[in-house]
């Protein structure tokens, strides 16, 4: 599923509570059908600001937001200085 604002992969969803003047951002569930909110990529979700008079609740798991690549293997060190260069 892609972001409603761009072609990046959606990682969060945003919903509105009009009566409470509240915008909520949550982690995108695995089985979300798109009903009741808008899919968003992390950069767009991070930049979201509520309109004047509204509040924003960011209920995402911050470990996933701050460190999305933490579970991936690190890139191997390809070049290192040689100690026996004359």
Image (cartoon, helix red, strand yellow):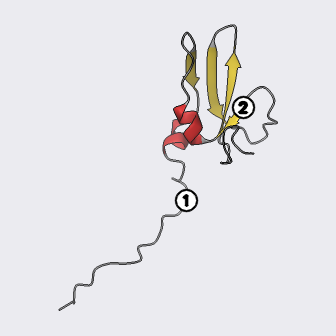
Residue 53 in picture, x, y percent from top left? 55, 9
As displayed, is residue 29 above or below residue 22?
A: below
As displayed, is residue 59 above or below residue 41?
A: above
Q: Does label 2 or label 1 sit earlier along the sequence? A: 2
As displayed, is residue 22 above or below residue 32?
A: above
From the image, tell me which residue sits under label 2.
38
60 left or right, relative to 37? left
Which of pointers 2 and 1 indicates the residue nearer the eye? 2
4 left or right, relative to 77? right
Q: Residue at x 72, y 31 (%)?
A: 38
Quarter of the image with the N terminus in it? top right
Residue 19 in picture, x, y percent from top left? 69, 7
Q: Residues within 10 Å of mark 1 (few under 14, many from 20)?
A: few
SS at mark 1? loop
Q: Residue at x 21, y 89 (%)?
A: 85
Quarter of the image with the C terminus in it? bottom left
Q: Residue at x 56, y 29 (%)?
A: 48
Q: CA distance from mark 2 to mark 1?
A: 27 Å
> Could you say which quadrant of the image residue 64 lies in?
top right
> Could you say which quadrant of the image residue 81 lies in?
bottom left
Q: Residue at x 54, y 48 (%)?
A: 68
Residue 15 in picture, x, y percent from top left? 69, 24
Residue 55 circle label:
none
Residue 57 in picture, x, y percent from top left? 57, 22
From the image, tell me which residue sits under label 1.
72
């Amino acid at each position: 599923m892609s972001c409603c604002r761009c072609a990046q992969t959606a990682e969060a969803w945003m919903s509105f509570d009009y009566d409470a003047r509240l915008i909520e951002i949550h982690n995108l569930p695995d089985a979300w059908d798109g009903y009741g909110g808008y899919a968003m990529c992390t950069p767009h979700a991070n930049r979201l600001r509520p309109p004047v008079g509204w509040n924003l609740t960011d209920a995402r798991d911050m470990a996933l937001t701050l460190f999305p690549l933490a579970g991936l293997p690190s890139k191997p060190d390809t070049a290192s200085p040689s100690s026996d260069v004359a």
